[in-house]
Image (tube, rainbow, N blue to C red):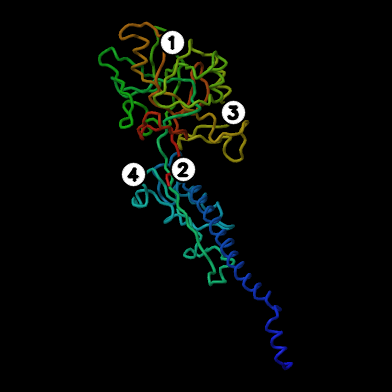
């Protein structure tokens, strides 16, 4: 065998250089895995961030819609401005997403087909956010260049709704008489007295989901100044005037517990339809003490009669509340409203004045109420809207009488 043939056979059987082939194949495989893991990871992290951005924008817009101005749907209105600002402030992969305030922040009336049917009261706001090629702010494709992909994109949509609330877990222990139809002119929150016996008769009509009845409404009563007058259902000579309320038992015994329930939260959810037991006695002293405790929690808060909302609250920046955890002013409270005719009948037993001991009352509505303070024995404040709860086992609330609002994502 020639030397040349021997050398050729030796080289052909040698394993030298085989590792280079394996390394080359491994690089291709690892690059493919890296492209999948890294680029796909960037895509999904960014997708979640984009959804957070859209959710934040929609929720902020719904809050502004409910508590700032429900009617102003312009680009300069509080709902669009809040939605736009909050959506853009939540970055997507380190950069601000694109949100056009005119075309990407919309209401049901703008495009009904782009909203669920539950938004047909035009109480929803939709926010679309983008970080993609079409908007000129695409995400990077770190390893995608290996297969000719240089960028990638995400978008997200959220729809939030402001809906009527029917419950609260921070109810104040004041069962307030509902409004009624006055026989001799308009209802006066300062002077009207309920008289269903003398002709012409005052008439009470309880609210329902389809009809606010004679109850308080947003159109007529939002911002109205109310003097809550502490009453005593066991007094057979009690006059049922506008703003009359009975102290009620929200759990616990005695004046100290009643006072604490004014200055704090009982932490039990009560809804339209819930039954409350009235306290024995008028609780004038504990009422005054509890209101004083409540006002001290947010002593600089004021009611703006023009904007019809709370201003100078400790919950605004910089947060200065004496206790943590308040999302709204602690002086913005939930008041249970009771059936005026039923309460009158229980105390007067028809035409007779008998007094009612161990009386119970049913909640027919819940009002938002900003507590200004005490004026003598009266609790003074203003009817307001308030963020609160909506529970499935509670009664329905007419949208026109919904002083409680709940904000929820519907898509």
Mark 2 or 4: the one toward you: 4
Image height of 78 relative to 342, above or below: below
Q: Mark 1: give few (<14), some (14-19) or many (20+) Cα within 10 Å.
A: few
Label 4: state its secondary structure.
loop
Of residues 208 and 63, the one nearer the viewer is 208
Helix, strand or loop status at disc 2? helix
- Residue that numbered label 4 is attached to: 120
- Are circles 4 and 1 on residues that touch, CB within 8 Å? no
Disc 4 from disc 1: Cα separation: 45 Å
Looking at the image, which residue is at 49% across and 20% down? 173
Farthest residue to the left: give it.
199
Q: Quadrant of residue 405?
A: top left
Q: Mark 1 or 3, which is nearer the eye?
A: 1
First in sequence: mark 2 vs mark 4: 2
Helix, strand or loop at label 1? It is loop
Which residue is labeled 2 in the image? 64
Comes first in the chain, label 4 or label 1: 4
Q: Secondary structure at mark 3?
A: loop
Pointer 2 local density, CA inside 10 Å: few below 14, some 14–19, many at least 20: many
In 3D space, how far apart are the residues under numbered discs 2 and 4 (Cα atoms)? 19 Å
Report if residue 278 is visible in the image: yes
Q: Are marks 2 and 1 in contact (CB under 8 Å)?
A: no
For image coordinates 48% across by 63% down, the residue present is: 135
Label 3 vs 4, first from the N-terminus? 4
Give yes or no for contact between labels 3 and 4 (Cβ–Cβ under 8 Å).
no
Identify the residue position indicated by label 1 in the image: 358
């Amino acid at each position: 065998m020639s030397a040349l043939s021997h050398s050729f056979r030796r080289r052909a059987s040698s394993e030298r250089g085989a590792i280079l082939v394996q390394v080359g194949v491994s690089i291709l495989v690892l690059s493919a895995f890296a492209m999948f893991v890294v680029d796909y990871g960037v895509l999904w992290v960014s997708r979640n961030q984009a959804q957070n951005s859209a959710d934040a924008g929609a929720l902020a817009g719904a809050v502004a819609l409910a508590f700032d101005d429900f009617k102003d749907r312009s680009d300069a209105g509080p709902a669009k401005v809040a939605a736009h600002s909050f959506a853009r402030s939540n970055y997507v992969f380190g950069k601000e997403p694109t949100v056009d305030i005119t075309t990407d922040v919309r209401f049901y009336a703008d495009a009904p087909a782009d909203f669920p049917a539950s938004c047909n009261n035009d109480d929803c706001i939709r926010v679309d956010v983008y970080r993609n090629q079409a908007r000129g702010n695409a995400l990077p494709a770190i390893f995608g260049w290996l297969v000719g992909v240089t960028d990638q994109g995400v978008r997200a949509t959220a729809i939030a709704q402001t809906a009527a609330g029917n419950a609260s877990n921070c109810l104040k222990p004041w069962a307030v008489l509902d409004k009624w139809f006055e026989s001799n002119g308009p209802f006066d929150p300062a002077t009207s007295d309920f008289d269903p016996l003398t002709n012409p008769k005052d008439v009470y009509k309880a609210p329902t989901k389809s009809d606010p009845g004679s109850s308080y409404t947003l159109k007529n009563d939002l911002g109205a100044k109310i003097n809550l007058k502490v009453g005593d259902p066991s007094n057979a000579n009690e006059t049922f005037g506008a703003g009359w309320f009975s102290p009620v038992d929200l759990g616990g015994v005695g004046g100290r517990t009643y006072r604490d329930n004014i200055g704090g939260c009982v932490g039990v959810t009560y809804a339209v339809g819930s039954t409350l037991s009235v306290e024995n006695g008028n609780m004038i002293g504990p009422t005054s003490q509890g209101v004083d405790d409540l006002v001290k929690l947010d002593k600089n808060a004021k009611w703006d009669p023009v904007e019809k909302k709370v201003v100078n609250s400790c919950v605004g920046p910089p947060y200065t509340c004496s206790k943590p955890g308040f999302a709204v002013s602690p002086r913005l409270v939930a008041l249970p409203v009771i059936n005026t005719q039923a309460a009158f009948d229980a105390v007067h037993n028809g035409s007779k004045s008998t007094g009612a001991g161990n009386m119970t009352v049913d909640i027919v509505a819940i009002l938002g109420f900003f507590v200004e303070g005490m004026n003598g024995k009266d609790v003074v404040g203003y009817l307001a809207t308030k963020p609160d709860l909506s529970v499935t086992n509670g009664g329905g609330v007419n949208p026109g009488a919904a002083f409680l609002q709940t904000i929820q994502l519907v898509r």
